[in-house]
Amino acid sequence: HLEINYMTLPTHKQKLLEIDLELIGNLERFVNKLQEKIDTLQRLADEIRQPLIEAEGREEEYLGNPLNSFPLLRHLYSDWDLLEEFIANQVGQEQIDFLKEKLSELPLPKDLSAATEAIYRIELAYGVKPFDLAKGLIDGVQYDAKLSSLDCYVMATHHFRLGDYAKASQWLTVALSLMNPSDMKINSVFKYQRTDVGLMLARCFLEMGSEREARYVLSKEVNMTTEEIDVKIKQLQLVGDDSYQHQKYVPDHLLPEGFNAICQSSHKPKPTKHLYCRYNTTTTPFLRLAPFRMEELSLNPYMVAYHNVLSDEEIRQLNRMSAPLLKKAFPVSAVDIDYDVRTVDTAWFPNSETPHTKENDRLIKRIVNIVSDLTGLNADVADSFQAVRYGFGGHYSPHHDYFNESIHQTAVNGDRLATVLFYLNTVKHGGATVFPLLNLKVPAEKGKVLFWYNLDGESLDFDENTEHGVCPVVDGIKLVLASWINELADEIRQPLIEAEGRQEEYLGNPLNSFTLLRHLYSDWDLLEEFIANQVGQEQIDFLKEKLSELPLPKDLSAATEAIYRIELAYGVKPSDLAKGLIDGVQYE
Ligand SMILES: O=C(O)CCC(=O)C(=O)O
Ligand SMILES: [Fe+2]
Protein backbone atom coordinates (compact mmCIF):
# COMPACT_ATOMS: atom_id res chain seq x y z
CA HIS A 1 0.00 0.00 0.00
CA LEU A 2 2.90 2.31 0.77
CA GLU A 3 4.00 2.79 -2.80
CA ILE A 4 0.58 3.94 -3.92
CA ASN A 5 0.75 7.48 -5.12
CA TYR A 6 -2.58 8.94 -6.14
CA MET A 7 -1.25 12.46 -6.60
CA THR A 8 1.31 12.09 -9.35
CA LEU A 9 0.76 8.72 -10.98
CA PRO A 10 -2.10 8.66 -13.50
CA THR A 11 -2.13 4.86 -13.36
CA HIS A 12 -2.65 4.93 -9.61
CA LYS A 13 -5.36 7.53 -9.91
CA GLN A 14 -6.93 5.28 -12.54
CA LYS A 15 -6.98 2.56 -9.89
CA LEU A 16 -9.29 4.70 -7.75
CA LEU A 17 -11.82 4.73 -10.58
CA GLU A 18 -11.49 1.00 -11.12
CA ILE A 19 -11.98 0.10 -7.50
CA ASP A 20 -14.94 2.47 -7.24
CA LEU A 21 -16.54 0.82 -10.28
CA GLU A 22 -16.01 -2.61 -8.73
CA LEU A 23 -17.60 -1.50 -5.48
CA ILE A 24 -20.55 0.06 -7.31
CA GLY A 25 -21.10 -3.26 -9.14
CA ASN A 26 -20.99 -5.02 -5.81
CA LEU A 27 -23.47 -2.55 -4.33
CA GLU A 28 -25.83 -3.13 -7.25
CA ARG A 29 -25.70 -6.89 -6.70
CA PHE A 30 -26.52 -6.27 -3.07
CA VAL A 31 -29.46 -4.05 -4.05
CA ASN A 32 -30.76 -6.80 -6.36
CA LYS A 33 -30.58 -9.37 -3.59
CA LEU A 34 -32.35 -7.02 -1.27
CA GLN A 35 -34.97 -6.32 -3.92
CA GLU A 36 -35.59 -10.07 -4.40
CA LYS A 37 -36.17 -10.44 -0.69
CA ILE A 38 -38.51 -7.48 -0.68
CA ASP A 39 -40.48 -8.98 -3.60
CA THR A 40 -40.71 -12.35 -1.85
CA LEU A 41 -41.84 -10.78 1.41
CA GLN A 42 -44.38 -8.62 -0.41
CA ARG A 43 -45.87 -11.67 -2.16
CA LEU A 44 -45.96 -13.60 1.10
CA ALA A 45 -47.74 -10.79 2.85
CA ASP A 46 -50.30 -10.62 0.01
CA GLU A 47 -50.89 -14.39 0.09
CA ILE A 48 -51.26 -14.59 3.82
CA ARG A 49 -53.67 -11.69 3.85
CA GLN A 50 -55.88 -13.11 1.02
CA PRO A 51 -57.89 -15.61 3.17
CA LEU A 52 -58.44 -13.00 5.83
CA ILE A 53 -59.88 -10.62 3.26
CA GLU A 54 -62.24 -13.39 2.12
CA ALA A 55 -63.32 -14.04 5.68
CA GLU A 56 -63.98 -10.43 6.50
CA GLY A 57 -67.53 -9.86 7.71
CA ARG A 58 -68.38 -13.56 7.76
CA GLU A 59 -65.80 -14.88 10.15
CA GLU A 60 -68.04 -17.43 11.85
CA GLU A 61 -69.10 -19.04 8.58
CA TYR A 62 -65.52 -18.99 7.30
CA LEU A 63 -64.03 -20.69 10.31
CA GLY A 64 -66.83 -23.27 10.30
CA ASN A 65 -65.26 -24.75 7.22
CA PRO A 66 -62.47 -27.16 8.18
CA LEU A 67 -60.66 -26.40 4.95
CA ASN A 68 -60.38 -22.91 6.23
CA SER A 69 -59.65 -23.54 9.86
CA PHE A 70 -57.04 -26.16 9.16
CA PRO A 71 -54.89 -24.01 6.85
CA LEU A 72 -55.17 -21.15 9.32
CA LEU A 73 -53.98 -23.28 12.13
CA ARG A 74 -51.23 -24.92 10.17
CA HIS A 75 -50.10 -21.58 8.87
CA LEU A 76 -50.03 -19.99 12.28
CA TYR A 77 -48.35 -23.05 13.72
CA SER A 78 -45.32 -23.14 11.42
CA ASP A 79 -45.11 -20.32 8.80
CA TRP A 80 -44.30 -17.37 11.01
CA ASP A 81 -41.57 -19.30 12.70
CA LEU A 82 -39.83 -19.93 9.40
CA LEU A 83 -40.59 -16.43 8.20
CA GLU A 84 -38.84 -15.04 11.23
CA GLU A 85 -35.76 -16.98 10.19
CA PHE A 86 -36.06 -15.74 6.59
CA ILE A 87 -36.45 -12.11 7.61
CA ALA A 88 -33.63 -12.24 10.12
CA ASN A 89 -31.27 -13.86 7.65
CA GLN A 90 -28.80 -11.23 6.36
CA VAL A 91 -29.19 -10.57 2.64
CA GLY A 92 -26.09 -10.35 0.46
CA GLN A 93 -23.54 -11.60 2.98
CA GLU A 94 -21.28 -12.23 0.02
CA GLN A 95 -21.43 -8.58 -1.05
CA ILE A 96 -20.85 -7.40 2.49
CA ASP A 97 -17.76 -9.61 2.77
CA PHE A 98 -16.49 -8.33 -0.57
CA LEU A 99 -16.89 -4.74 0.58
CA LYS A 100 -15.06 -5.47 3.85
CA GLU A 101 -12.23 -7.04 1.97
CA LYS A 102 -11.90 -4.07 -0.39
CA LEU A 103 -11.79 -1.55 2.44
CA SER A 104 -8.10 -2.27 2.91
CA GLU A 105 -7.40 -1.13 -0.65
CA LEU A 106 -9.05 2.25 -0.24
CA PRO A 107 -7.13 5.51 0.27
CA LEU A 108 -5.58 6.15 3.68
CA PRO A 109 -5.95 9.27 5.84
CA LYS A 110 -2.69 10.61 4.45
CA ASP A 111 -4.07 10.27 0.92
CA LEU A 112 -7.09 12.35 1.84
CA SER A 113 -4.84 14.94 3.51
CA ALA A 114 -2.68 15.14 0.40
CA ALA A 115 -5.73 15.64 -1.83
CA THR A 116 -7.24 18.21 0.56
CA GLU A 117 -3.99 20.14 0.67
CA ALA A 118 -3.71 20.02 -3.13
CA ILE A 119 -7.12 21.68 -3.51
CA TYR A 120 -6.16 24.09 -0.74
CA ARG A 121 -3.00 25.14 -2.60
CA ILE A 122 -4.95 25.62 -5.82
CA GLU A 123 -7.47 27.73 -3.92
CA LEU A 124 -4.72 29.90 -2.42
CA ALA A 125 -2.44 30.24 -5.42
CA TYR A 126 -5.15 31.09 -7.93
CA GLY A 127 -7.24 33.09 -5.47
CA VAL A 128 -10.30 30.90 -6.18
CA LYS A 129 -13.43 31.62 -4.13
CA PRO A 130 -14.97 28.52 -2.50
CA PHE A 131 -18.21 29.10 -4.40
CA ASP A 132 -16.39 29.09 -7.76
CA LEU A 133 -14.16 26.18 -6.87
CA ALA A 134 -17.20 24.11 -5.85
CA LYS A 135 -18.76 24.62 -9.26
CA GLY A 136 -15.52 23.94 -11.15
CA LEU A 137 -14.42 27.48 -12.08
CA ILE A 138 -10.67 27.82 -11.49
CA ASP A 139 -8.66 30.85 -12.55
CA GLY A 140 -10.87 31.58 -15.53
CA VAL A 141 -11.23 27.97 -16.70
CA GLN A 142 -14.61 26.27 -16.34
CA TYR A 143 -14.03 22.57 -15.69
CA ASP A 144 -16.67 19.91 -16.20
CA ALA A 145 -16.51 18.91 -12.55
CA LYS A 146 -17.87 20.05 -9.22
CA LEU A 147 -17.66 19.46 -5.49
CA SER A 148 -20.41 18.03 -3.29
CA SER A 149 -21.60 19.47 -0.01
CA LEU A 150 -19.55 16.91 1.89
CA ASP A 151 -16.43 17.77 -0.20
CA CYS A 152 -16.92 21.41 0.79
CA TYR A 153 -17.33 20.46 4.43
CA VAL A 154 -13.97 18.66 4.34
CA MET A 155 -12.36 21.76 2.78
CA ALA A 156 -13.97 23.90 5.49
CA THR A 157 -12.57 21.61 8.18
CA HIS A 158 -9.09 22.00 6.70
CA HIS A 159 -9.31 25.81 6.84
CA PHE A 160 -10.80 25.65 10.30
CA ARG A 161 -7.89 23.60 11.60
CA LEU A 162 -5.46 26.10 10.15
CA GLY A 163 -7.35 28.84 11.99
CA ASP A 164 -8.59 30.53 8.82
CA TYR A 165 -12.15 31.02 10.08
CA ALA A 166 -13.18 33.47 7.39
CA LYS A 167 -12.39 31.00 4.60
CA ALA A 168 -13.82 28.10 6.63
CA SER A 169 -17.11 29.97 6.99
CA GLN A 170 -17.22 30.57 3.22
CA TRP A 171 -16.78 26.87 2.55
CA LEU A 172 -19.46 26.03 5.14
CA THR A 173 -21.88 28.43 3.52
CA VAL A 174 -21.30 26.70 0.18
CA ALA A 175 -21.70 23.30 1.90
CA LEU A 176 -25.09 24.42 3.25
CA SER A 177 -26.22 25.74 -0.11
CA LEU A 178 -25.37 22.41 -1.76
CA MET A 179 -27.33 20.38 0.78
CA ASN A 180 -30.79 19.43 -0.49
CA PRO A 181 -33.49 18.15 1.90
CA SER A 182 -33.78 15.11 -0.37
CA ASP A 183 -30.14 14.22 0.34
CA MET A 184 -30.79 13.89 4.05
CA LYS A 185 -31.09 10.10 4.06
CA ILE A 186 -27.98 9.68 1.93
CA ASN A 187 -26.01 12.11 4.07
CA SER A 188 -27.04 10.28 7.22
CA VAL A 189 -25.44 7.12 5.82
CA PHE A 190 -22.21 9.11 5.73
CA LYS A 191 -22.91 10.46 9.22
CA TYR A 192 -23.06 13.94 7.75
CA GLN A 193 -25.77 16.28 8.94
CA ARG A 194 -26.79 19.84 8.42
CA THR A 195 -26.26 20.39 12.14
CA ASP A 196 -22.55 19.47 11.74
CA VAL A 197 -22.17 22.27 9.25
CA GLY A 198 -24.19 24.65 11.41
CA LEU A 199 -22.13 23.92 14.52
CA MET A 200 -18.83 24.54 12.80
CA LEU A 201 -20.16 27.69 11.17
CA ALA A 202 -21.26 28.98 14.59
CA ARG A 203 -17.76 28.20 15.90
CA CYS A 204 -16.26 30.23 13.05
CA PHE A 205 -18.46 33.21 13.82
CA LEU A 206 -17.56 33.03 17.50
CA GLU A 207 -13.86 32.86 16.64
CA MET A 208 -14.31 35.90 14.41
CA GLY A 209 -16.02 37.70 17.29
CA SER A 210 -19.54 37.70 15.94
CA GLU A 211 -21.74 36.16 18.61
CA ARG A 212 -24.90 37.50 16.97
CA GLU A 213 -24.28 35.52 13.79
CA ALA A 214 -23.26 32.46 15.80
CA ARG A 215 -26.60 32.57 17.62
CA TYR A 216 -28.50 32.97 14.37
CA VAL A 217 -26.80 29.90 12.86
CA LEU A 218 -27.37 27.77 15.97
CA SER A 219 -31.04 28.64 15.86
CA LYS A 220 -31.59 28.31 12.12
CA GLU A 221 -29.28 25.40 11.15
CA VAL A 222 -28.96 23.48 14.41
CA ASN A 223 -32.55 24.10 15.55
CA MET A 224 -31.52 25.03 19.07
CA THR A 225 -33.79 26.82 21.51
CA THR A 226 -32.65 30.09 23.04
CA GLU A 227 -31.77 28.29 26.27
CA GLU A 228 -29.76 25.65 24.42
CA ILE A 229 -27.96 28.37 22.50
CA ASP A 230 -27.06 30.19 25.73
CA VAL A 231 -25.57 27.00 27.15
CA LYS A 232 -23.71 26.17 23.93
CA ILE A 233 -22.21 29.62 23.52
CA LYS A 234 -21.08 29.73 27.14
CA GLN A 235 -19.54 26.29 26.80
CA LEU A 236 -17.66 27.23 23.64
CA GLN A 237 -16.45 30.50 25.10
CA LEU A 238 -15.26 28.84 28.29
CA VAL A 239 -13.65 25.63 27.18
CA GLY A 240 -13.56 25.82 23.40
CA ASP A 241 -14.41 22.73 21.46
CA ASP A 242 -11.99 19.86 21.39
CA SER A 243 -13.87 18.06 18.65
CA TYR A 244 -11.66 19.88 16.13
CA GLN A 245 -7.91 19.45 16.05
CA HIS A 246 -5.87 22.53 15.29
CA GLN A 247 -2.75 22.83 13.22
CA LYS A 248 -0.58 25.88 12.93
CA TYR A 249 -1.51 28.55 10.44
CA VAL A 250 0.98 28.49 7.58
CA PRO A 251 -0.38 29.86 4.30
CA ASP A 252 1.92 32.91 4.14
CA HIS A 253 4.95 30.70 4.11
CA LEU A 254 3.30 28.16 1.83
CA LEU A 255 2.47 30.46 -1.07
CA PRO A 256 3.10 34.14 -0.49
CA GLU A 257 0.70 36.63 -2.00
CA GLY A 258 3.16 38.26 -4.38
CA PHE A 259 3.94 34.83 -5.74
CA ASN A 260 0.28 33.89 -6.12
CA ALA A 261 -0.51 37.05 -8.06
CA ILE A 262 1.97 35.96 -10.73
CA CYS A 263 0.52 32.44 -10.89
CA GLN A 264 -2.91 33.80 -11.75
CA SER A 265 -4.11 34.21 -15.31
CA SER A 266 -4.75 37.90 -14.62
CA HIS A 267 -0.99 38.48 -14.27
CA LYS A 268 0.36 40.81 -16.94
CA PRO A 269 3.99 40.15 -17.87
CA LYS A 270 6.21 43.20 -17.61
CA PRO A 271 7.29 44.79 -20.90
CA THR A 272 10.66 43.40 -21.94
CA LYS A 273 12.05 46.15 -24.14
CA HIS A 274 15.72 45.45 -23.43
CA LEU A 275 15.39 41.76 -23.99
CA TYR A 276 15.78 39.85 -27.18
CA CYS A 277 14.62 36.80 -28.92
CA ARG A 278 17.19 35.35 -31.28
CA TYR A 279 19.26 32.34 -32.15
CA ASN A 280 22.23 31.58 -29.93
CA THR A 281 25.08 30.75 -32.25
CA THR A 282 27.90 32.03 -30.12
CA THR A 283 28.19 30.22 -26.82
CA THR A 284 29.93 27.23 -28.30
CA PRO A 285 30.97 26.22 -31.83
CA PHE A 286 28.26 23.58 -31.73
CA LEU A 287 25.60 26.25 -31.67
CA ARG A 288 26.86 27.74 -34.91
CA LEU A 289 25.79 24.51 -36.52
CA ALA A 290 22.65 23.87 -34.50
CA PRO A 291 21.31 27.14 -33.15
CA PHE A 292 18.50 27.14 -30.60
CA ARG A 293 15.88 29.85 -30.51
CA MET A 294 16.72 31.78 -27.39
CA GLU A 295 14.62 34.21 -25.43
CA GLU A 296 16.29 36.50 -22.90
CA LEU A 297 13.98 36.71 -19.92
CA SER A 298 16.11 38.77 -17.59
CA LEU A 299 19.50 40.45 -17.68
CA ASN A 300 20.06 40.67 -13.94
CA PRO A 301 20.10 37.89 -12.94
CA TYR A 302 20.91 36.62 -16.39
CA MET A 303 18.20 34.25 -17.52
CA VAL A 304 17.33 32.76 -20.90
CA ALA A 305 14.88 30.23 -22.25
CA TYR A 306 15.67 28.04 -25.24
CA HIS A 307 12.92 26.45 -27.27
CA ASN A 308 12.52 23.04 -28.87
CA VAL A 309 15.79 21.76 -27.48
CA LEU A 310 14.87 18.14 -26.84
CA SER A 311 12.93 16.09 -29.34
CA ASP A 312 9.75 14.22 -28.42
CA GLU A 313 11.57 10.94 -28.76
CA GLU A 314 14.37 12.08 -26.44
CA ILE A 315 11.78 13.20 -23.90
CA ARG A 316 9.99 9.85 -24.16
CA GLN A 317 13.26 8.07 -23.53
CA LEU A 318 14.06 10.33 -20.57
CA ASN A 319 10.69 9.62 -19.03
CA ARG A 320 11.15 5.90 -19.56
CA MET A 321 14.51 6.12 -17.82
CA SER A 322 13.37 8.19 -14.86
CA ALA A 323 9.89 6.76 -14.23
CA PRO A 324 11.07 3.73 -12.22
CA LEU A 325 13.26 5.99 -10.11
CA LEU A 326 10.68 8.54 -9.15
CA LYS A 327 9.72 7.74 -5.64
CA LYS A 328 6.93 9.13 -3.59
CA ALA A 329 8.57 12.03 -1.85
CA PHE A 330 5.42 13.27 -0.18
CA PRO A 331 6.07 14.97 3.09
CA VAL A 332 3.23 13.48 5.09
CA SER A 333 4.21 14.24 8.64
CA ALA A 334 2.52 17.32 10.02
CA VAL A 335 5.32 17.76 12.57
CA ASP A 336 7.80 18.29 9.77
CA ILE A 337 7.97 22.08 9.41
CA ASP A 338 8.85 21.81 5.76
CA TYR A 339 5.94 19.61 4.89
CA ASP A 340 4.39 22.31 2.80
CA VAL A 341 7.45 23.51 0.92
CA ARG A 342 7.35 21.09 -1.94
CA THR A 343 4.95 18.39 -3.08
CA VAL A 344 6.67 16.33 -5.75
CA ASP A 345 8.32 13.04 -6.51
CA THR A 346 12.03 13.31 -7.19
CA ALA A 347 14.86 11.06 -8.28
CA TRP A 348 18.55 11.69 -8.77
CA PHE A 349 19.30 10.51 -12.16
CA PRO A 350 20.85 8.51 -13.65
CA ASN A 351 21.66 6.29 -10.69
CA SER A 352 22.78 2.74 -10.11
CA GLU A 353 19.37 1.46 -11.17
CA THR A 354 19.54 3.09 -14.57
CA PRO A 355 20.29 0.46 -17.19
CA HIS A 356 23.53 1.20 -19.05
CA THR A 357 22.14 0.73 -22.51
CA LYS A 358 23.72 2.39 -25.48
CA GLU A 359 20.71 4.69 -25.97
CA ASN A 360 20.63 5.70 -22.31
CA ASP A 361 24.32 6.53 -22.21
CA ARG A 362 24.08 8.43 -25.46
CA LEU A 363 21.10 10.46 -24.28
CA ILE A 364 22.75 11.36 -20.98
CA LYS A 365 25.88 12.44 -22.82
CA ARG A 366 23.75 14.53 -25.15
CA ILE A 367 22.03 16.26 -22.25
CA VAL A 368 25.37 17.01 -20.60
CA ASN A 369 26.53 18.48 -23.90
CA ILE A 370 23.37 20.53 -24.31
CA VAL A 371 23.86 21.98 -20.85
CA SER A 372 27.40 23.07 -21.61
CA ASP A 373 26.51 24.25 -25.12
CA LEU A 374 23.65 26.41 -23.92
CA THR A 375 25.44 27.84 -20.92
CA GLY A 376 29.05 27.91 -22.03
CA LEU A 377 29.82 26.45 -18.63
CA ASN A 378 31.65 23.25 -17.95
CA ALA A 379 28.78 20.95 -17.19
CA ASP A 380 30.38 17.78 -16.06
CA VAL A 381 27.26 16.97 -14.12
CA ALA A 382 26.18 13.57 -15.31
CA ASP A 383 25.47 12.50 -11.78
CA SER A 384 23.47 15.49 -10.76
CA PHE A 385 20.31 15.55 -12.78
CA GLN A 386 17.15 15.51 -10.83
CA ALA A 387 13.93 14.23 -12.37
CA VAL A 388 10.95 15.96 -10.77
CA ARG A 389 7.28 15.06 -11.12
CA TYR A 390 4.49 17.28 -9.80
CA GLY A 391 1.00 15.82 -9.38
CA PHE A 392 -2.32 17.60 -9.01
CA GLY A 393 -1.81 20.60 -6.74
CA GLY A 394 1.94 19.83 -6.82
CA HIS A 395 3.97 22.94 -6.07
CA TYR A 396 7.28 24.31 -4.88
CA SER A 397 7.31 27.25 -2.49
CA PRO A 398 9.65 30.14 -3.33
CA HIS A 399 13.27 29.20 -2.63
CA HIS A 400 16.82 29.75 -3.83
CA ASP A 401 18.77 26.98 -5.50
CA TYR A 402 22.01 27.86 -3.74
CA PHE A 403 22.68 26.39 -0.33
CA ASN A 404 24.76 29.25 1.07
CA GLU A 405 26.05 27.00 3.80
CA SER A 406 28.91 24.64 4.39
CA ILE A 407 27.73 21.18 3.63
CA HIS A 408 29.60 18.31 2.12
CA GLN A 409 28.27 19.09 -1.32
CA THR A 410 29.33 22.75 -1.36
CA ALA A 411 32.71 21.86 0.09
CA VAL A 412 33.38 19.40 -2.70
CA ASN A 413 31.72 21.08 -5.66
CA GLY A 414 31.12 24.66 -4.64
CA ASP A 415 27.64 26.14 -4.59
CA ARG A 416 25.13 26.10 -7.41
CA LEU A 417 26.43 28.69 -9.85
CA ALA A 418 23.69 28.15 -12.41
CA THR A 419 20.45 26.21 -12.85
CA VAL A 420 19.29 24.52 -16.05
CA LEU A 421 15.70 23.27 -16.18
CA PHE A 422 14.39 20.98 -18.95
CA TYR A 423 10.61 21.06 -19.30
CA LEU A 424 9.50 17.60 -20.35
CA ASN A 425 5.81 18.25 -20.87
CA THR A 426 3.37 21.08 -21.44
CA VAL A 427 1.13 21.70 -18.44
CA LYS A 428 -2.37 22.66 -19.54
CA HIS A 429 -3.14 24.72 -16.45
CA GLY A 430 -0.75 25.76 -13.69
CA GLY A 431 2.75 24.52 -12.92
CA ALA A 432 4.61 27.62 -14.14
CA THR A 433 8.00 28.49 -12.68
CA VAL A 434 7.65 31.90 -11.04
CA PHE A 435 10.33 34.42 -10.01
CA PRO A 436 8.42 36.76 -7.71
CA LEU A 437 11.17 39.38 -7.36
CA LEU A 438 11.50 39.59 -11.15
CA ASN A 439 7.73 39.56 -11.66
CA LEU A 440 8.39 36.74 -14.10
CA LYS A 441 6.34 33.66 -14.99
CA VAL A 442 7.82 30.84 -17.10
CA PRO A 443 5.11 28.43 -18.27
CA ALA A 444 5.91 24.73 -18.47
CA GLU A 445 6.26 23.97 -22.20
CA LYS A 446 7.54 20.74 -23.64
CA GLY A 447 11.08 20.90 -25.01
CA LYS A 448 11.90 24.26 -23.42
CA VAL A 449 15.07 24.76 -21.40
CA LEU A 450 15.44 27.53 -18.81
CA PHE A 451 18.86 28.70 -17.67
CA TRP A 452 19.86 31.25 -15.06
CA TYR A 453 22.78 32.26 -12.86
CA ASN A 454 22.22 31.98 -9.14
CA LEU A 455 25.28 34.06 -8.32
CA ASP A 456 25.70 37.71 -9.14
CA GLY A 457 27.92 38.06 -12.22
CA GLU A 458 29.97 40.82 -10.67
CA SER A 459 30.38 40.03 -7.01
CA LEU A 460 29.67 36.32 -7.24
CA ASP A 461 27.45 36.88 -4.20
CA PHE A 462 24.27 34.87 -3.93
CA ASP A 463 21.72 36.67 -6.03
CA GLU A 464 18.57 36.90 -3.95
CA ASN A 465 16.57 37.96 -6.98
CA THR A 466 16.80 34.40 -8.28
CA GLU A 467 14.14 33.36 -5.76
CA HIS A 468 11.64 31.13 -7.53
CA GLY A 469 8.90 28.56 -7.00
CA VAL A 470 6.30 26.53 -8.86
CA CYS A 471 2.58 27.39 -9.04
CA PRO A 472 0.36 24.45 -8.09
CA VAL A 473 -0.45 22.21 -11.04
CA VAL A 474 -4.17 22.41 -11.74
CA ASP A 475 -4.65 20.07 -14.68
CA GLY A 476 -2.49 17.00 -15.32
CA ILE A 477 1.07 16.57 -14.11
CA LYS A 478 4.36 18.40 -14.62
CA LEU A 479 7.68 16.75 -15.49
CA VAL A 480 11.04 18.52 -15.40
CA LEU A 481 14.69 17.59 -15.35
CA ALA A 482 16.83 19.93 -13.25
CA SER A 483 20.56 20.30 -13.56
CA TRP A 484 22.80 22.47 -11.44
CA ILE A 485 26.21 23.69 -12.48
CA ASN A 486 28.44 24.03 -9.49
CA GLU A 487 31.02 26.77 -9.10
CA LEU A 488 33.90 24.35 -9.09
CA ALA A 489 32.76 22.59 -12.23
CA ASP A 490 33.67 25.74 -14.05
CA GLU A 491 37.26 24.89 -14.98
CA ILE A 492 38.33 28.50 -15.27
CA ARG A 493 37.96 28.82 -11.55
CA GLN A 494 39.66 25.55 -10.78
CA PRO A 495 43.26 26.80 -10.21
CA LEU A 496 42.08 29.57 -7.91
CA ILE A 497 40.09 27.17 -5.83
CA GLU A 498 43.09 24.86 -5.57
CA ALA A 499 45.17 27.80 -4.46
CA GLU A 500 42.73 28.79 -1.78
CA GLY A 501 44.33 28.96 1.67
CA ARG A 502 47.84 28.20 0.42
CA GLN A 503 48.34 30.97 -2.08
CA GLU A 504 51.97 31.56 -1.30
CA GLU A 505 52.89 27.93 -1.72
CA TYR A 506 50.68 27.67 -4.75
CA LEU A 507 52.19 30.66 -6.46
CA GLY A 508 55.68 29.71 -5.39
CA ASN A 509 55.51 26.92 -7.88
CA PRO A 510 56.55 28.17 -11.29
CA LEU A 511 54.09 25.99 -13.13
CA ASN A 512 51.22 27.45 -11.21
CA SER A 513 52.41 31.00 -11.64
CA PHE A 514 52.96 30.46 -15.30
CA THR A 515 49.57 28.89 -15.84
CA LEU A 516 47.91 31.63 -13.92
CA LEU A 517 49.81 34.35 -15.70
CA ARG A 518 49.29 32.90 -19.12
CA HIS A 519 45.66 32.36 -18.40
CA LEU A 520 45.16 35.88 -17.10
CA TYR A 521 47.08 37.25 -19.99
CA SER A 522 45.15 35.75 -22.82
CA ASP A 523 42.11 33.74 -21.77
CA TRP A 524 39.93 36.48 -20.43
CA ASP A 525 40.52 38.62 -23.44
CA LEU A 526 39.33 35.89 -25.74
CA LEU A 527 36.61 34.96 -23.35
CA GLU A 528 35.32 38.48 -23.37
CA GLU A 529 34.85 38.20 -27.09
CA PHE A 530 33.46 34.73 -26.75
CA ILE A 531 30.72 35.57 -24.32
CA ALA A 532 30.04 39.13 -25.38
CA ASN A 533 26.81 38.13 -27.04
CA GLN A 534 25.49 36.28 -24.10
CA VAL A 535 26.16 37.81 -20.72
CA GLY A 536 24.76 41.07 -19.44
CA GLN A 537 26.37 44.33 -20.47
CA GLU A 538 27.20 45.01 -16.86
CA GLN A 539 29.42 41.97 -16.58
CA ILE A 540 31.08 42.76 -19.89
CA ASP A 541 31.85 46.27 -18.72
CA PHE A 542 33.28 44.93 -15.50
CA LEU A 543 35.50 42.59 -17.43
CA LYS A 544 36.64 45.36 -19.79
CA GLU A 545 37.50 47.57 -16.89
CA LYS A 546 39.56 44.83 -15.29
CA LEU A 547 41.51 44.17 -18.47
CA SER A 548 43.69 47.19 -17.71
CA GLU A 549 44.84 45.57 -14.50
CA LEU A 550 45.96 42.36 -16.19
CA PRO A 551 49.61 41.49 -17.11
CA LEU A 552 51.30 43.22 -20.05
CA PRO A 553 53.17 41.56 -22.94
CA LYS A 554 56.46 42.18 -21.14
CA ASP A 555 55.19 40.24 -18.15
CA LEU A 556 54.39 37.25 -20.28
CA SER A 557 57.86 37.44 -21.90
CA ALA A 558 59.52 37.52 -18.49
CA ALA A 559 57.60 34.50 -17.31
CA THR A 560 58.25 32.58 -20.52
CA GLU A 561 61.93 33.31 -20.19
CA ALA A 562 61.98 32.21 -16.57
CA ILE A 563 60.55 28.81 -17.48
CA TYR A 564 62.96 28.65 -20.40
CA ARG A 565 65.94 29.22 -18.08
CA ILE A 566 64.76 26.51 -15.68
CA GLU A 567 64.32 24.14 -18.61
CA LEU A 568 67.85 24.83 -19.83
CA ALA A 569 69.66 24.99 -16.52
CA TYR A 570 68.22 21.75 -15.15
CA GLY A 571 68.04 19.94 -18.44
CA VAL A 572 64.29 19.28 -18.09
CA LYS A 573 62.55 17.57 -20.96
CA PRO A 574 59.37 19.32 -22.13
CA SER A 575 57.32 16.19 -21.33
CA ASP A 576 58.63 16.19 -17.73
CA LEU A 577 58.26 19.91 -17.30
CA ALA A 578 54.69 19.72 -18.57
CA LYS A 579 53.81 17.21 -15.86
CA GLY A 580 55.67 18.99 -13.08
CA LEU A 581 58.90 16.97 -12.81
CA ILE A 582 61.86 19.35 -12.47
CA ASP A 583 65.36 18.14 -11.69
CA GLY A 584 64.20 15.10 -9.73
CA VAL A 585 61.47 16.95 -7.80
CA GLN A 586 57.86 16.11 -8.57
CA TYR A 587 55.74 19.22 -8.10
CA GLU A 588 52.02 19.07 -7.69
O1 LIG B 1 10.02 22.71 -11.60
C1 LIG B 1 10.39 23.87 -11.73
O2 LIG B 1 9.89 24.62 -12.58
C2 LIG B 1 11.42 24.44 -10.81
C3 LIG B 1 12.14 23.40 -10.05
C4 LIG B 1 13.06 23.98 -9.04
O3 LIG B 1 12.99 25.12 -8.72
C5 LIG B 1 14.08 23.15 -8.39
O4 LIG B 1 14.06 21.93 -8.58
O5 LIG B 1 14.93 23.71 -7.67
FE1 LIG C 1 14.76 25.73 -7.67
Image (spheres, helix red, strand yellow):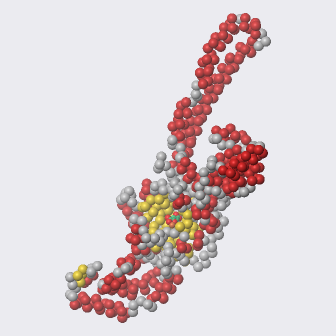
**Nearest to the observer: residue 140 or residue 472:** 472
Which is more toward the observer, 185 or 136?
185
Residue 72 place in picture, x, y as percent: 67, 11
Residue 176 shows up from this direction: no
Residue occupying the far front of the picture: 238
Instruction: State the residue at coordinates (33%, 92%).
Output: 557
| 437 relative position to 203: left or right | left
Q: Looking at the image, which is closer to me, 143 or 235? A: 235
Q: Please indicate, yes or no, whether residue 259 appears anywhere in the rendered image.
A: yes
Q: Where is residue 184 in the image (x, y as percent from the top left)?
A: 70, 40
Q: Residue at x 60, y 53 (%)?
A: 246
Placement of the C terminus among the 4 image quadrants: bottom left
- Give residue 59's position: percent from left, percent from top: 76, 10
Image point (55%, 73%), residue name: 465
Residue plotted at (64% across, 64% down): 265
481 versus 586 height, above or below? above
Quarter of the figure with residue 78: top right
Using the image as rendered, state which of residue 522 and residue 190 is in the foreground: 190
Determine whether 533 is above or below 143 in the image: below
Q: Which residue is farthest bottom?
A: 554
556 left or right, relative to 172: left
Report the number of numbered marks: 0
Q: How far across and down, in percent of the image, does residue 586 sit?
A: 24, 80
Image vertical order of residue 204 relative to residue 547, above or below: above
